[in-house]
């Protein structure tokens, strides 16, 4: 199955407004248009948080951008979203299920947000829900999506805002052999790695990117981006990042 991941669009509450000097509605539109040309028939779309920039008015633009999607649009909140408002404002084709089966795969969408904070955390109830979902789908390969990065990225200010109980999370995952991949946003930069047999994938933003290996907040010049993922029946993951410049 082909899945497309768009993350951290940071849409403004006022149509046409900028976020840190970036026309984020326009950059998201360019990414979606590029994906429709290059990857026209996804089985699922994954939106991994910071859908709006602290203003619920932005959800209308997000809904308009994806309302004609032929594929289910799975979404989870980031630290600039209100989880309850995400579910209230985004109806079909948006999907708010915790776990969804696609053939040999189960896609799990986890909420790592902490009210009023920018770092991430999974409470006991959500970890128990994950444990139960993976147990119920023991014969499937699992792709787990979240907003906050569960491993350090080498950027001092950003790593203070990662998932704060990642060790507990990975300990749970180690009990489920079917977990094949983790995909997240939040960091506005690419990341590729492995943790045991689990592929780790951090995805750049559809708007601005953060400078890598920077001790303090800094934006760099890389263009908007999104990720494609080919989920094989054998549990393999082929994936890549599409950088969408002005002329793409």
Image (cartoon, helix red, strand yellow):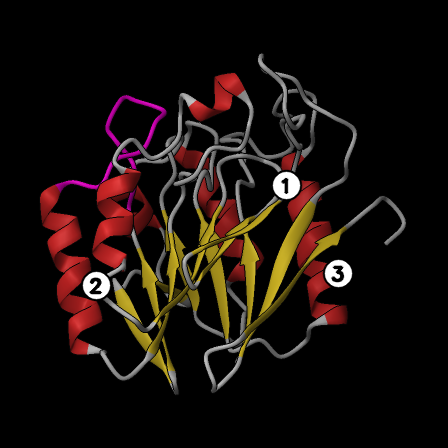
Q: Residue at x 72, y 60 (%)?
A: 33
Task: From the image, state whether disc 2 or disc 3 is nearer to you.
Answer: 2
Q: Residues within 10 Å of mark 1 (few under 14, many from 20)?
A: many
| Label 1 sits on residue | 25
Question: Which quadrant of the view contains residue 2?
Answer: bottom right
Q: CA distance from mark 2 to mark 3?
A: 38 Å
Whether tag 1 and tag 3 are in contact, CB under 8 A, the answer is: no
Q: Is residue 157 left or right of residue 173?
A: right
User: Which segment is the magenta one?
Assistant: 111-123
Q: Earlier in the sequence, mark 1 or mark 2?
A: 1
Q: Say if the magenta span includes residue 32.
A: no
Q: CA distance from mark 1 to mark 2?
A: 41 Å
**Quadrant of the drawing holding the C terminus:** bottom right
Considering only vertical position in the picture, is 228 above or below 200?
Answer: below
Q: Earlier in the sequence, mark 1 or mark 3?
A: 1
Question: Which quadrant of the view contains residue 91?
Answer: bottom left
Q: Residue most toward the right?
A: 247
Q: How many marks?
A: 3
Name the residue nearer the viewer: 239 or 98. Answer: 239
Task: From the image, state whether disc 1 or disc 2 is nearer to you.
Answer: 2
Q: Which mark is residue 175?
A: 2
Query: How far across and how far down the image is residue 169, in percent?
Result: 25, 47
Query: How far across and how far down the image is residue 216, in percent?
Result: 58, 12
Considering only vertical position in the picture, is 205 above or below 67?
Answer: above
Query: How far across and how far down the image is residue 228, in percent?
Result: 62, 64
Task: From the image, state whether disc 1 or disc 3 is nearer to you.
Answer: 3
Name the residue nearer the viewer: 25 or 170. Answer: 170
Q: Residues within 10 Å of mark 2 (few under 14, many from 20)?
A: few
Q: Earlier in the sequence, mark 2 or mark 3?
A: 3
Query: How far across and how far down the image is residue 102, in percent?
Result: 39, 81
| Label 3 sits on residue | 34
Q: Secondary structure at mark 3?
A: helix
């Amino acid at each position: 199955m082909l899945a497309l991941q768009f993350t951290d669009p940071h849409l403004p509450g006022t149509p046409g407004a900028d976020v840190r000097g970036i026309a984020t509605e326009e950059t998201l539109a360019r990414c979606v248009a590029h994906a429709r040309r290059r990857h026209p028939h996804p089985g699922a779309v994954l939106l991994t948080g910071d859908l709006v920039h602290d203003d619920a008015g932005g959800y209308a633009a997000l809904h308009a951008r994806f309302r004609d999607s032929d594929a289910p649009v799975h979404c989870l909140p980031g630290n600039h979203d209100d989880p309850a408002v995400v579910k209230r404002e985004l109806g079909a084709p948006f999907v708010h299920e915790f776990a969804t089966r696609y053939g040999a795969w189960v896609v799990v969408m986890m909420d790592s947000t902490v009210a009023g904070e920018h770092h991430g955390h999974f409470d006991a109830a959500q970890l128990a829900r994950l444990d139960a979902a993976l147990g119920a789908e023991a014969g499937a390969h699992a792709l787990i999506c979240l907003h906050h990065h569960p491993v350090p990225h080498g950027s001092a200010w950003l790593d203070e805002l990662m998932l704060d109980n990642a060790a507990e999370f990975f300990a749970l995952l180690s009990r489920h052999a079917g977990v094949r991949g983790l995909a997240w946003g939040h960091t506005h930069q690419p990341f590729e790695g492995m943790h045991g047999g689990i592929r780790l994938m951090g995805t750049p933003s559809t708007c601005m990117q953060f400078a890598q290996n920077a001790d303090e907040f800094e934006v760099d010049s890389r263009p908007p981006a999104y990720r494609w993922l080919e989920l094989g029946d054998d549990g393999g993951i082929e994936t890549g990042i599409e950088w969408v410049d002005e002329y793409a």
